[in-house]
Image (spheres, coloured by chain):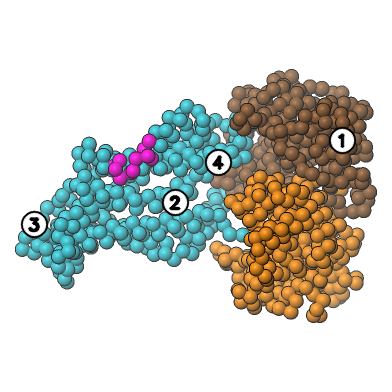
Amino acid sequence: MKSNKFTFWKENVGRSWYKFSRNKLSVIGLTLFILLILAAILAPLITPYPKHAGNFVDLITGSQAPDARHLMGTDIYGRDMFSRIIFALRPALLMGIMVLAIVVPIGTILGLIAGYYKGKFGDHIIMRLTDVFLGLPPLILALAVSSILKPTLTNSMIAVSVAFWPWYSRLVYNMVISIKNEHYVISSELLGESRVHILFREILPNCLSPIFTKMTLDFGWVIIMTASLSFVGLGEQPPDPSLGTMVAEGARLLPDKWWVAIYPAFTIVLLVLSLNLIGDGVRDMFTATEE
Amino acid sequence: MGDNYLLKVEDLTVDYKVYGGYLKVLDGVNFYVKHNERVGIIGETGCGKTTTMKSILRLQANNAIFRKGKITVGDQDILKMNDKNFHAFRKKGLAMIFQEPMIALNPVFTIGQQIEDVIYHASDTKLSKAELKQKAREVIASVSLPDADRILSNYPFQLSGGMRQRICIALAISMAQKLLIADEPTTALDVTIQAQILELIDQISKQKKMSLILITHSLGLTRNTTDRMYVMYAGSMIESCSTKQLYENPLHPYTIGLLKSIPRLTGGEFSNGIPGRLPDYMNPQPGCRFQNRCTKVMDICRRQKPSEIEVEPEHYVACFLFDQKGDKQ
Amino acid sequence: MKDLDFIKIENVKKYFPIGNDLFVKALDGIDLEINKGETVGLVGESGSGKSTLAYTLMGMYEPTDGKISFKNENIGLKAQKRDLSIKKEMQIVFQDPSGSLNPRRVISNILSRPLLLHKIVPKNELKAKLIELLDSVELPQEYLYKYTPSIGGGEKQLIAIARAIAAHPEFLILDEPTSSLDVSVQGKIINTLMKLKKELNLTYLFITHDMSLMRNVADRIAIMYLGKIMELATTREFFENPLHPYTKMLLSSIPVVSAEEEKLLPKEIKSSGEIPSPVNLPEGCRFITRCPYAKEICETKEPELTEREPGHWSRCYY
């Protein structure tokens, strides 16, 4: 009988892929993103100068323009830009994954509770708090939090998370308000189901698709925000490579030594763009079927 | 042939492209509407009636694929017209009343603005503001709504469902001169309002000498409003005859089953309906599409698609039960 | 009469505040008794309050005023405050089966919830019981492992019915169970419901706007209009001798499919007007805006629901 369930999922995955792949740009985005992830994972193997990712100084080869030896040139310390960029993908992707892993469960649970108890005390507490956080521009909020903390990767993760959770509680809140009036939720209430069951087994599964859509879009945002934090020196500290720091260093050398700033900036754009394209496809995937 | 037909649909075949292949939704639809004739099309959810109507108005969904067939209005093949000509033609000739009067009207414009807009675009001469307003009043009055001025200045949400549906009819008839297509015009309405709207459609189509296509899933609605009927099942017309014949002497097993499953005011036993469900549109079995639900299924039904046979004058059935050649085999 | 007090609804009111001290008077004083084992048909247009009555009975709303009792026990409460034992006895089947079954849960999960919650069967017999349930609505056991979006509307409704009867309730509210379905499957649903009623000795409150259907399933029929019952009679009485003008208007609007039926429709009254908003009710009779027979007294004083013939009640001066 398990096989029945399996064919259902197989069919579902097939249909989802069909809808996702109808948008060719999303497929391009997905391919790009997978390539970037592979590059990050295999960084020590594919980069020509893995050592340059760390504390390496060779002033003789400093500030060289891109050529055959250094595809994207070198920075002022003579480190290979290409190697550093590939290594910098690691903290960027890690940030995205970790921040989402923190904010999505927190925001979702708070939104579920507030939405289900709409009009009650808990709703007011949670949603007013959400409103306060939503009222502050996320970047400013993240800057403020990380300027209090020590500038490390973990701390900038916390800072960005503080700025992101309210978006999820707001999203889930609005969904729960409409889903809780669906007759299948009411049926379970009339049957005498516990609230935990209703919240997590009846309502939550029906909130998942917009959450996933938002997650793919937010992934890019998190990366931009991390880069912004490290651009102003509040993220990962040198010598560890970080896209934001690299852009910041390169910005001083513009326009003569353009490659130091442009390549990391372009990588950020590529990463965020690929995620946004995926996000569009994911949205199509979850919208209602034709016919 | 020729002049007598207002609308003629021949062998219309439309597929939808979806995950895993094509849904063969329309499988050779044939029907016609004469001038000043009122035609009912009966069919259940998913039988393709809406797809047919959307094809006539060229409002198909993006994933619809037109395979073959011909739709002629008068002497023009509307599938071959270019967009501009078709829009000009549709504006004058065809109009549709949709099922849901709540969403057929734009909520942010007043009824007056919407009706005047339609009149403005439909008329050949440029009308002045006052003329437009006057025409709009006439249109409102033509659907038996009192207090035209108040209604014209109202927004859709200020009106009840029945009034909104009257407005939709008003919009439709204010431009169309030839053919009115009503797609489940009363499904969203209460019984008492339904009776009123049906009477209005009946009265207007007679008065304006318009042809009418009334599409519905409820056999009770067409009995007094139409002259001739088509029964549609799984993408083709399986029976067509005069309305009277259909109710008194239905021939196709599907039509008989449908009529039997309607609860009667006279009481009595209540049939179990028609077992089974619509065929799989993606991989329909060869032969008759009703075979799996039919109580009188024969060998030939599984091999061959039945063609329409004239069993009695003007009474066509697509079923091998009535096909002499089918009997012999 | 047997078991007079199975379900007793006394002067039940439900007002929904809409601000500015205005109220939507969805239920405006309903009196109704439902006896064990009968099917009461509740007919009305949208806005008549028939669904509000059903939902109040089920405990989705708390009545503003009045008393509802089930076997002499007060149930005029929200469902959350009711005993689990009462919840077990009353179930509802909603109009739209797609909305009443969670699309993300497999059918075996949906059906096993009431069995586990009300401890109908021990866990090791659960599977057998689920198959038995599907069998009672004539669906094969493969359906246990399907998700509802992959099955047809009629089958979904059968699943919803199976869920409703799973915990062996005594009373079932059917809120337009067939009106979102095609005619060809309607018969199957109705016949299944009638079969279950006999087998399980159920009592039904059957809400619908389809009078022809009522004719075939109900023992008694109540007509609602703007939150009040306008006429109440046994089915036979109701169709042979309708008293209230509103009933006649409803009957005259029925779309029928044969000449014999057409003869049964009242001819003297034609449908006109629409149901007014339940916020500002007329002072006198609430049907006055559409009634062709309105007299002076109808404008000032609302008629009472009076017994005109044994068991036949009507709210009209006529």
Q: Earlier in the sequence, mark 3 or mark 2?
A: 3
Kindly identify the residue that appears in the image at 21 percent across and 56 percent down.
A247
Q: Is residue A263 magenta?
A: no
The numbered dot on residue A213 is 2
Near mark 3 (Cα within 10 A), the count class, few <14, some 14-19 or many ≥20, is: some
Q: Which percent across, then down, holds residue B250?
A: 87, 62
Question: Mark 4: which amino acid?
Answer: Ser
As drawn, the chain in brown is C
Identify the hue of chain B: orange
Q: Quadrant of residue C277?
A: top right
**Left or right: where C150 falls relative to B164:** left
Q: Residues within 10 Å of mark 1 (few under 14, many from 20)?
A: some
Residue where numbered disc 1 is placed: C294
**Side (left or right) of A20 relative to B146:** left
Majority secondary structure in the magenta region = helix
Name the residue beneath numbered marker 3.
Answer: A57
* Dot 4: element: helix
Q: Which mark is residue A178?
A: 4
Q: Nearer the viewer, residue B307 or C271?
A: C271
Examine the rendered structure and indicate whether residue A185 appears above or below residue A44.
above
Q: Which chain is cyan?
A: A
Question: Where is A42 relative to C115, above or below?
Answer: below
